[in-house]
Image: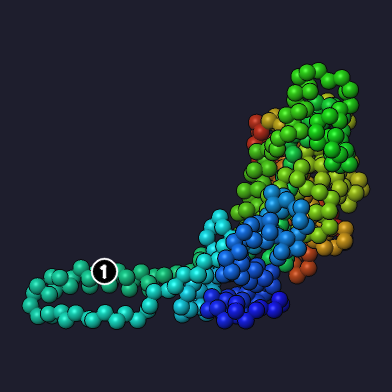
């Protein structure tokens, strides 16, 4: 811990911060203690210019000087958690503190607000309690007191489970362990999929990350038409995602329960290879819309394949078919049509064991949407656990992949079922 100079130590505001950071709500998170101490010290000293998101990320979280606050939301996530912890402190152990510490929304400054005195010194008026006029005047107050008492009693008798959001269910619970780390949801890059169709060529992850591809100048056709050139310029400069991805993100937020503030949404275009060295991730989409999924393809049994881009149907290749399974599973001809589509739900560890990855990929958008809706259904999650050979909440991560089939009608997935499962051994 950094040594505090005597002047700051003698400040009543800093003494309050010391009591807060020593309280039980802050004992489980060193990062939140450091964040509060840094923000409070800069606020007390009047050094508010040091309280920008970028400066906090570098000073408290050890981020590189050139890191992007657009790509990395860890400071915002931690400040939201800090506000909750402060409320918890002042509602409990710190309810008798003479001052309250607040962090206004949209700011990173620490405000100290004095609490009004709880002991009133005003003289108590003498009330004439004789005669009917007294009861006429007192009746509304008596009724108000009655309703107040019944409301308070009803509040304390309410079911406690309804007051706190539930914890995330399996398999999402694996991603929120430890509970104070962001889970990065990486949505598909629709521009990437459209670029593949314009160029009529598959794209590797290495090519996707190249500056020439990002600028729209890396085309197989060396002489594009003016229309193709305009399209490529637009695709290289914008960020688009799909309706299916929005449905999946909404599902993940609802399933995350008390951990939803730790979800950080990112586009596939914003990710970099070093980001995958540690952390927990959700990748939405298949390699043809989210190229980062190809980074994990060699660890999966069911892998997306296709012939000529834009002309051949996509399918899942079953690398090691079991008895009764097909070698390939072919999906819809295109998004918005009716028929069968397939998707996989996979949970696997990072290569170095410093995090976990959940992949929801469909051959078309209907399949991707179906994967998210499948996890939202408790009965589906139970069926998946039974297929994998366990039940309840496992004490250790259970890594797996499952192939699901959905019946799509005019672009909407319906009647989803499990086709095959595999246990992934780390």
SS label for mark 1? helix
Question: In this picture, is 197 found above or below 39?
Answer: above
Locate residue 188, reporting x and y percent.
Answer: 74, 41
Quadrant location of the N terminus? bottom right
Name the side, left or right, on which 239 lies relative to 89. right
Asked if 233 appears above or below 143 in the picture, the reply is above
Q: Nearer the viewer, residue 72 or 188?
A: 72
Residue 376 place in picture, x, y as percent: 64, 52
**Disc 1 crowd, CA 10 A, few/some/many (<14, 14-19, 20+):** few
Tell me which corner region of the image, top left, top right, bottom left or bottom right, holds residue 369.
top right
Front position in the image: 403 or 308: 308
Q: What is the basis of the colouring in this image?
A: rainbow
Image coordinates of residue 238 in percent, x first then y, are 71, 35
Determine which quarter of the picture holds residue 244: top right
- 137 with respect to 264 (left or right): left
Position above or below: 226 against 16: above
Residue found at x 83% / y 20%: 224
Q: Position of residue 187 (x, y in %)?
A: 72, 45
At 67% from the left and 71% from the top, the residue drawn is 34
Q: Is residue 105 above or below residue 294?
A: below
Regarding residue 358, the answer to whether it shows in the image is: no
* Quadrant in which the C terminus is drawn: bottom right
Q: Residue at coordinates 78% horizontally, 68% vertically from top-left?
A: 396
> In the image as oriented, which residue stretches furthest toward the front?
7
Pick out the residue farthest to the top. Answer: 225
Q: Which residue is mark 1?
A: 144
- Say whether residue 238 is left or right of residue 143: right
Q: Tell me what residue is drawn at x 82 percent, y 45 percent.
A: 292
Residue 204 image-quadrant placement: top right
Furthest-left residue in this view: 131
Kindly tell me whether residue 89 is visible in this rendering: yes
């Amino acid at each position: 811990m950094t040594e505090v100079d005597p002047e700051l130590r003698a400040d009543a505001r800093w003494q309050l911060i010391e009591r807060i950071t020593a309280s039980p709500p802050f004992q489980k998170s060193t990062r939140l203690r450091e964040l509060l101490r840094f923000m409070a010290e800069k606020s007390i000293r009047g050094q508010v210019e040091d309280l920008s998101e970028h400066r906090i990320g570098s000073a408290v979280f050890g981020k590189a000087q050139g890191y992007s606050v657009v790509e990395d939301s860890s400071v915002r996530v931690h400040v939201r958690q800090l506000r909750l912890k402060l409320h918890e402190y002042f509602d409990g152990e710190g309810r008798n503190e003479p001052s309250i510490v607040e962090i206004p929304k949209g700011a990173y400054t620490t405000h100290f607000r004095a609490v009004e005195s709880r002991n009133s010194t005003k003289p108590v008026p003498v009330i004439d309690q004789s005669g009917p006029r007294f009861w006429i005047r007192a009746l509304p107050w008596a009724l108000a007191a009655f309703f107040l008492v019944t409301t308070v009693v009803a509040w304390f008798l309410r079911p406690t489970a309804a007051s706190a959001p539930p914890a995330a269910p399996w398999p999402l619970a694996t991603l929120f362990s430890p509970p104070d780390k962001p889970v990065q949801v990486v949505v598909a890059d629709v521009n990437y999929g459209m670029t593949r169709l314009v160029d009529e060529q598959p794209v590797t992850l290495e090519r996707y990350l190249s500056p020439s591809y990002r600028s729209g100048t890396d085309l197989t056709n060396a002489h594009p038409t003016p229309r193709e050139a305009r399209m490529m310029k637009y695709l290289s400069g914008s960020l688009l995602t799909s309706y299916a991805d929005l449905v999946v993100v909404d599902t993940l937020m609802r399933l995350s329960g008390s951990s939803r503030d730790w979800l950080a949404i990112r586009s596939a275009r914003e990710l970099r290879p070093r980001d995958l060295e540690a952390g927990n991730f959700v990748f939405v989409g298949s390699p043809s819309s989210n190229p980062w999924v190809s980074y994990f393809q060699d660890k999966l049994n069911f892998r997306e394949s296709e012939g000529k881009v834009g002309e051949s149907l996509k399918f899942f290749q079953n690398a090691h078919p079991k008895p009764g399974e097909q070698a390939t599973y072919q999906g819809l001809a295109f998004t918005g049509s009716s028929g069968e589509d397939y998707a996989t739900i996979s949970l696997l560890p990072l290569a170095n064991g410093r995090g976990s990855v959940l992949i929801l990929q469909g051959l078309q958008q209907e399949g991707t949407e179906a994967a998210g809706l499948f996890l939202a259904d408790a009965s589906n999650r139970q069926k998946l656990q039974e297929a994998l050979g366990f039940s309840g909440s496992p004490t250790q991560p259970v890594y797996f992949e499952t192939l699901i089939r959905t019946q799509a009608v005019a672009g909407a997935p319906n009647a989803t079922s499990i086709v095959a499962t595999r246990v992934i051994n780390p």
